[in-house]
Amino acid sequence: MKKIITILATIALSCAMVNTVHAKKGTKTSSIPQQQTQAQKSTTMIDKKTTADTRKLNDTMKALTTANTPEKKAVVKQKISEAAAELLEDLEETHEERSTFSELITGYSKEQKDKAKAKLADLYPMKVKLDKKIKDLNDIWAVITTEDGSPVKGKEATYEIAKQKFSEWIPLSEKIDNIIYNQEIIAGIKWSTAFKSLMYAAALGADYHLFGGTVTGISAVKAGLSLAAAWGTLNALLETQNKLNLAQFAYNSAKDFLNSLLADPDATPEEIAKAEKNVAQKQTEQKKLEQQVKQQQQKQPAKA
């Protein structure tokens, strides 16, 4: 329970910091004509709903702190999954309207925003994992140093290693912070904040089937698995099941792409052969994970 409370406190602080950091640094605002078009109004409504649903998901995740039985935790995780699915729908809703209006106002194209979102999906868990390593190192530092910061007798070698790690990790953490800030400007602050909440929901065990299956959903699940592994809360069977879900999505996507090539009279034999090879590879990966899930399920203790 203590670990869950600590994790949820980190989530709340992390989500709050997105808006705080951008408010402190300041972002350029564009002058928007007073008379909004229908697309602008629609985008504004979506943004308001996204903000509200992000808050709803964060509040639902906090409820895990008071869920003190497996049954209560299961109910809360179901609610987290449903709230995550609703938030994901906000991010996918009227995508073309949002993209067109956003490019007009921010100056960033859809391609630039998509690249920024992909980078953030990798950077967020990377930053959390690095900060955890720094925190763990700080705990070690407290044990191997005296009040004046000098090494405890017999811990000189560990002291020097820790100093070296600090000199590498702290600047790297600051560098990642700056990169994240720049990518969030391009991707959009509301999207970035919402995505982080989805990522945390996945890390806390939300049901993939309820909010996966889209590009954003898949990215959130992958980032969430990475986070859960860093936290040390990832169940081996759950990890394999989620990997299987991702593999199934990848296999189906590969098949859809192959079918589109087969229906395209301009598709070359080389393109088709490459797509067929990719389908076969994805199918092999899926079958391998299916076998791993079966093996892990057999090792699970029988329920009373």
Image: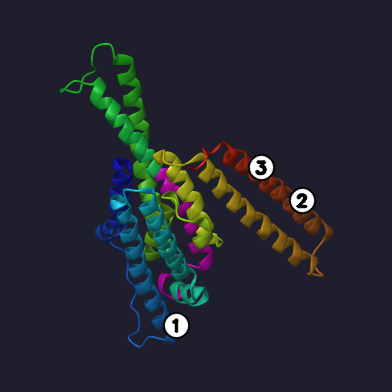
What range of the chain is rendered magenta? 104-127
How many C-alpha atoms fall within 10 Å of the one at disc 3: few (<14), some, or many (≥20)?
few
Q: Is residue 195 among the parts visible in the rendering?
A: no
User: Farthest residue in the front direction?
Assistant: 304
Residue topped by disc 2: 277
What's the residue at 55%, 60% (across, down)? 215
Q: Residue furthest right?
A: 269
| Residue at left offset 21%, top offset 19% | 150
Residue 159 picture location, percent across and down: 30, 20
Q: In front here: 133 or 120?
A: 133
Residue 14 colored magenta? no
Q: Residue at x 69, y 50 (%)?
A: 282
Magenta segment main secondary structure = helix
When the figure is inspected, residue 144 is found, relative to residue 81, above or below; the finding is above
For the residue pair 92 and 59, the one nearer the viewer reads as 59
Nearest to the eye among marks 3 and 2: give it: 3
Q: Which residue is drawn at the image coordinates 49% and 76% (left, top)?
A: 94
Residue to which mark 3 is pinned: 291
Q: Is residue 49 visible?
A: yes
**Residue 111 on the magenta segment:** yes
Q: How far apart are the two marked residues, 3 and 1, measured between alpha carbons? A: 48 Å
- Badge 2 crowding class, 10 Å Cα cut-off, few under 14, some 14 to 19, many 20 or more, is some
